[in-house]
Amino acid sequence: MKKFYLVLFALCISTKILSQTTATDFTVNDCNGNSHHLFSELNSGKVVVIAWVMPCPPCATHAVSAYSSALNFETSHPNRVKYYLVDDFANTTCSALSSWASSNGLGSTTMFSDAAISMTDYGQIGMPKIVVLGGLNHQIYFNQNSSTQGIDAAITQALQATNVNDGLSEIEIELFPNPSSDFLNISYNLISHSELTLEIFNMIGQSSMDIINIYNANKGTYKLDVSNLPIGTYYLKCNSNNISKVTKFTIVR
């Protein structure tokens, strides 16, 4: 009977891992000592590609392929796709990982050797395991072991889901006062009359207010009551004509 419950428990855990559809947050320093907070990157409109490697010769092919895919989006979506090279179980020194990366054409990547970035959060381990993460809901768009087939489509889908305005002028947003305590003024300027939707998310990607629709919007200011929001950091996502802009604001008391 005890053995039966142990097997049942293991199956439940496995099902949970395999069914995971959202990323696991982390805040860690890379091999150069720079701090990275995953959810902050995703909330700001970035798409993050993570490749876990042993490192070993067989890992190089797909790790390099994933890096090339991420790099190919730099022209069309500058600074939107980030590539993280991670030691599989954080038992390789940064020096050794960097040496392996350099010998395989990955020397300019952001590298980590930290157990907080765990590939087991994304199911079965792989050599390498590669995931693509994106969006305010921190969704997993790609999760494969020893394969990059379909990764370009996954990155494209993640970019489209976030669809942050890459320096274009279709949506101009200004928030004031920021920080705020009771009311937040949302000043908007659209290139043409269209519907504008406003969504508020907290730091872990949860919707914090009902969606607000402003019809036939062009230029104006919307006064948003934020008095019921708890103290903390939030993201305002403005959507119009399939273009989105994400802006951060803070609630203080």
Image (spheres, grey):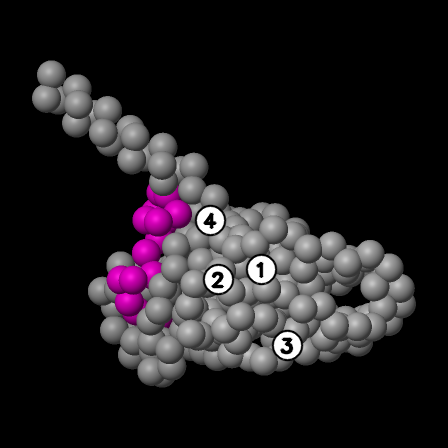
- What mark, if any, has residue 22 been given in the picture? 4
Residue at 32% x, 56% y is 118
Say whether residue 116 is magenta.
Answer: yes
- The residue stretch that appears in magenta: 112-127
On screen, 60 above or below 171?
above
- Residue 13 lies, in percent from the top left, at 29, 35
Q: Nearer the viewer, mark 4 or mark 3?
A: 3
Q: Nearer the viewer, mark 2 or mark 3?
A: 2
Q: Amino acid at mark 1?
A: Ile
Of the two numbered discs 1 and 4 in the rendering, the one whose residue sits closer to the viewer: 1
Identify the residue shown where x is 59% and y is 64%. Answer: 225
* C-alpha gap between disc 4 and disc 3: 29 Å
Callout 1 touching callout 2 (CB < 8 Å): yes
Looking at numbered disc 2 in the image, what kind of residue is underneath it? Leu
Image x and y of residue 31, in percent:
34, 78
Q: Nearer the viewer, mark 4 or mark 2?
A: 2
Q: Is residue 99 visible?
A: no
Compared across the picture, whether 45 is left or right of 15 comes to: right
Q: Quadrant of residue 53?
A: bottom left
**218 over 129 or under it: above or below:** below
- Which residue occupies 58% across, 80% down? 177
> Residue beneath label 2, please?
229
- Pick whichever of labels 4 and 3 is earlier in the sequence: 4
- State the CA–CA distance, disc 1 to disc 2: 10 Å
Query: Which sits in the foreground, 58 or 49?
Result: 49
Quadrant of the image occupied by residue 198:
bottom right
Question: Given the current orientation, which residue lies at the most extreme left position?
Answer: 2
